[in-house]
């Protein structure tokens, strides 16, 4: 490699920028045109074809960050996932998906696949043997999520990629929780990487978007389906996403550092009974996470000891917002039992290890001592309130 190999922050700040040749402005101009010339041009551009200047150029940044040849930007994470699946699955095909899946993806599979005649199996666990056991002769895709939501389990990227290769099928991953800063699944042989860009890529809780990155060949195949389904993102938002992604590495690294400190703080806290974070030595897949992640991410989950009500605790927080979604620069907490897993019965939740006391923590960029203070005061006030 050359001595001037681009670092992460340089890629974030500069790859995929559109040079403003006309006015020499420092940032990419935004092109909102839905009508482009057709004669004597190398590309016939149209927003639904994913090839406006802003879409085409931002895709270069995403591809660079995920170490792929090409990428596409979608109107949501779910548009990215659904278009990706529909590009590789047809009637009579089968997909193996990890059991601990993002709720929307799970709903898409359970509610829509039967209409297309696509078969699916949710694994029993996240070990490679669980995926092997779920394979059928007509399996065409294996889809994983690691770290998973909300228990932060780690699936072995290389083992899954090898399994898919041995069967000559496609492996796909939802890399949203790690972000490209903390994990590059392509380097382990996974074929296609998707993100809900609503989360870390956007990072400010104000953009809904999705991305898919892979070889040019796979991306062309997805594009063929996507141009028909019409899930491209408006250029206004593409431009906002580009602006957000300039600070992606700075944000995610700061959030990851905070999360590690907070995980240790919570693990040592007398009023906390359990912490789920791949960066902790107590995490069952800590060594695996160390091998396949650059950093352990900024998502963690924990349980307060019995007797401290999780919902009351959330109401006592002053700085950390009890709110849905994740990955913004601001810290948020939620109860999976009341949100992502609310539709499951208590029994089903117990079976996957999601208790009513489980709190999911999306760690932001705030000064860590302020976050610790907020948690501490909320615990004390919840306890006082309970005994009053
Ligand atoms: C939010 C999320 C999605 C869905 O993304 P949208 O942008 O809401 O459509 C998919 N996977 C994971 C892991 C997510 O957190």
Image: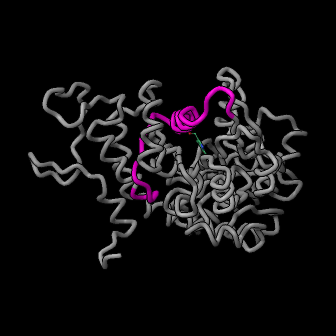
Ligand 1 lies in quarter = top right
Magenta segment, which residues? 64-93
Looking at the image, residue 67 sits to the left or right of residue 172; the answer is left
Taking depth in this image into account, of 259 and 159 the one nearest to the observer is: 159
Q: Nearer the viewer, residue 138 or 342?
A: 138
Residue sitting at the far top: 115
The quarter of the picture where the N terminus appears is bottom left
Q: Residue at x 71, y 50 (%)?
A: 150
Q: Position of residue 39 (x, y in %)?
A: 14, 27
* Number of numbered discs visible in the structure rendering: 0
The spot of residue 296 in percent (x, y) is 61, 66
Indicate the quadrant where residue 291 lies: bottom right
Residue 45: image location, x then y, percent: 26, 31
Residue 248, located in which quarter of the rendered image? bottom left
Q: Viewed as shown, does residue 197 lie left or right of 383?
A: left
Residue 135 placement: quadrant: top right
Image position of 58 (left or right of 43): right
Judge whether residue 91 is colored magenta. Answer: yes
- From the viewer's side, name the closer residue of 121 and 330: 121
Looking at the picture, how far across and down is residue 68, in whole percent? 44, 55
Q: Residue at x 61, y 67 (%)?
A: 292
Q: Residue at x 40, y 49 (%)?
A: 70
Residue under the image location 23 percent in, 48 percent down? 28
């Amino acid at each position: 490699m050359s001595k001037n190999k681009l670092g992460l922050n340089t890629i974030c700040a500069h790859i995929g920028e559109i040079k403003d040749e006309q006015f020499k402005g420092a940032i990419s101009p935004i092109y909102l045109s839905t009508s482009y010339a057709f004669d004597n041009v190398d590309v016939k551009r149209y927003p639904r074809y994913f090839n406006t200047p802003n879409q085409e150029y931002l895709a270069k940044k995403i591809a660079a960050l995920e170490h792929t040849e090409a990428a596409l930007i979608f109107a949501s994470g779910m548009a990215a996932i659904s278009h990706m699946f529909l590009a590789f699955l047809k009637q009579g095909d089968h997909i193996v998906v990890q059991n601990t899946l993002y709720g929307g993806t799970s709903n898409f599979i359970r509610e829509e696949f039967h209409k297309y005649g696509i078969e699916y199996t949710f694994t029993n666990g996240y070990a490679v043997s669980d995926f092997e056991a779920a394979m059928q002769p007509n399996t065409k895709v294996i889809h994983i999520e690691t770290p998973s939501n909300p228990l932060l389990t780690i699936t072995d990227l290389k083992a899954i990629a090898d399994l898919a290769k041995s069967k000559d099928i496609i492996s796909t991953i939802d890399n949203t929780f790690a972000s490209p800063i903390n994990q590059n699944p392509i380097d382990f042989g996974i074929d296609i990487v998707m993100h809900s860009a609503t989360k870390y890529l956007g990072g400010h809780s104000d953009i809904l978007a999705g991305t898919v990155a892979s070889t040019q060949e796979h991306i062309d195949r997805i594009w063929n389906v996507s141009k028909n389904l019409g899930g491209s993102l408006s250029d206004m938002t593409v431009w906002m996403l580009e602006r957000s992604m300039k600070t992606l590495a700075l944000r995610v690294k700061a959030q990851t550092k905070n999360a590690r400190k907070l995980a240790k703080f919570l693990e040592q806290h007398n009023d906390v009974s359990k912490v789920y974070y791949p960066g902790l030595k107590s995490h069952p897949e800590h060594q695996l996470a160390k091998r396949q992640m650059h950093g352990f991410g900024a998502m963690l989950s924990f349980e307060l000891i019995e007797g401290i009500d999780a919902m009351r605790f959330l109401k006592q927080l002053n700085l950390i917002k009890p709110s849905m979604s994740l990955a913004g620069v601001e810290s948020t907490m939620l109860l999976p039992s009341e949100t992502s897993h609310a539709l499951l019965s208590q029994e089903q939740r117990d079976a996957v290890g999601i208790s009513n006391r489980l709190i999911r923590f999306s760690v932001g960029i705030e000064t860590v001592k302020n976050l610790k203070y907020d948690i501490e005061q909320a615990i004390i006030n919840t306890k006082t309130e309970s005994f009053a």
